[in-house]
Amino acid sequence: MQKPKAIPLYYWRRLSQLACLALFFFLFINTDYAGRDEIRYAVNILFRIDPLLALTASVAAGFFILLMLPALLTLLFTLIFGRFFCGWVCPMGTLLDGSRVLMKSKVAAATRRYRPLKFHLLGFLLVGAWLGLPLVGLVDPFSILVRGLALAVDPALNALSTTFFTFTYQEAPAWVNSLTEPLYAFLKATILPFHQNYYELALLSLAILLLVFGLERLERRFFCRNICPLGALLAVTARFALLRGKAGVKCGSCRTCQDVCRMGAIDEQHQISPQECTLCLDCLHHCPGHKISFRFGWWRAPRPAFDLSRRTFAGSLALGALLPFFLKTRTLARQADPRLIRPPGALAEEEFVGRCVRCGECMKVCIGNGLQPAFLQGGLEAMFSPVLQARTGYCEYNCTLCGQVCPTGAIRKLSPAAKKKEKIGNALFDTDRCLPYAKGIACMVCEEHCPTPDKAIKFREAVVQNSRGEQVRVKQPYLVDELCVGCGICETKCPLAGRSAVIVTSAGESRNPDHALPTTGGMGY
């Protein structure tokens, strides 16, 4: 009886890619409020297996972050199998492979001209993280992908679907609604976010993501070959991998393996570079003479597949070392932006910025839509890190989700009781705009929404002149500093158009003793 043929590893690689991509989207969708203050799955696990994020965050923190322990497994498997992560696991790589259906690269042959760039970038990022310039989250593939999807694609799809189903509900006949309404209910329960969110820098996040895909027009997996710093770190590790590919020595003029290699890892002498090979097995599958094999063994470190200029690499290290010191000469180094309000549980600013990987997960999961990506409020080193913009949204008093999804512990996981005691800022009233002060018009919106059990916003009666010149008695709000937690809901809900009459700043935040409020007997303004 003839034995059934084994399924080639080439197809197992494809299956692994699809499974990991499905897992990625499953975790992404479940990074959302689901009716309770608890995330059921380890939605941040893909960030925690990223050795580049683990390394730079730990370097910035000054100690190894235990939350990132799974990343060591990635490095261990890379020492055994080479850059399998890029070819079998990485969702960005899988999506780039899928995009080949829509776009073909203009360059027919692979070029090695830009290959050293990712190593220069890796050196710059590591030295920068060590000296206080943590920028890895701007270029890490997971951060780019999740941030672009969370801040731009997910809200856009939700708005599009809501508009479509609302239109059909209002305009379509009953028989159409009998189909669309159950479909909409299913999508809301499974895929669409809890509510419509709006984000600053959404277009910039989307543009960066689209740029990665647009580079496919230049060269297949251009980002992976030439830019990705995670790929560079894995390439350095894979140089000592036990599993190596070996091409035939008598292949003649056949270039099939070179033509199908998505990473350009095979040179003119049919040598397979372990630094560039992602174990996709395309060459093994398409080789007409079956002269390619992959074997385990102890190998000498191979020569690099390209020239890495020591002078240029030293320059990238020097730039990473010097730039942080130039940034420390800015005015921000002496006086922080008072509107730079961090999430509850955030570490002290320097360590917070160092650990934050700019993934956007805390912003996606924020119920009140208050967490927004920073632009330059905290400097270049804090770009895309989360800040509370209280006019856009607020920090829900009973919510602790941001600390649950943070992969590096930049935002500490707080219990509900501890979170309610965490002060992230303090409110103050602009009496030139507040209606009871400026117009003599009664307004209690801020006090009604204040979530603290003993209201932080209270009233005192005063006689003022209204806009008609009449003397009227109104209740004017004031703040009890000791009761305010800085959640920002008063600023969000202020009924005035434009700038709110209630302004929340980082004054008095728990994490920074230097921002302590002066003693005023419990009464603010």
Image (cartoon, grey):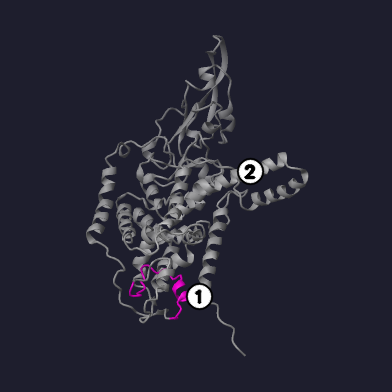
The three-letter code of the residue at mark 1 reads Leu
Label 1 environment density (alpha carbons within 10 Å; few <14, some 14–19, many ≥20): some
Secondary structure of the magenta portion, mostly? loop
Residue nearest the viewer, comparing 154 with 68:
154
Would you place residue 493 above or below residue 387 in this image? above
**Quarter occupied by residue 307:** bottom left
Badge 1 marks a residue whose secondary structure is: helix
Q: Residue furthest front?
A: 253
Q: Which residues are magenta?
A: 268-290
Mark 2 or mark 1: which comes first in sequence? 1
Answer with left or right where residue 422 lies relative to residue 174.
left
Which residue: 27% across, 55% down?
316
Q: Is residue 483 magenta?
A: no
- The image shows a total of numbered marks equal to 2
Residue 95 screen position, x and y as percent: 50, 59
Where does label 2 land, which residue?
162
Where does label 1 land, which residue?
9
Q: Is residue 273 magenta?
A: yes
Residue 283 screen position, x and y as percent: 44, 73
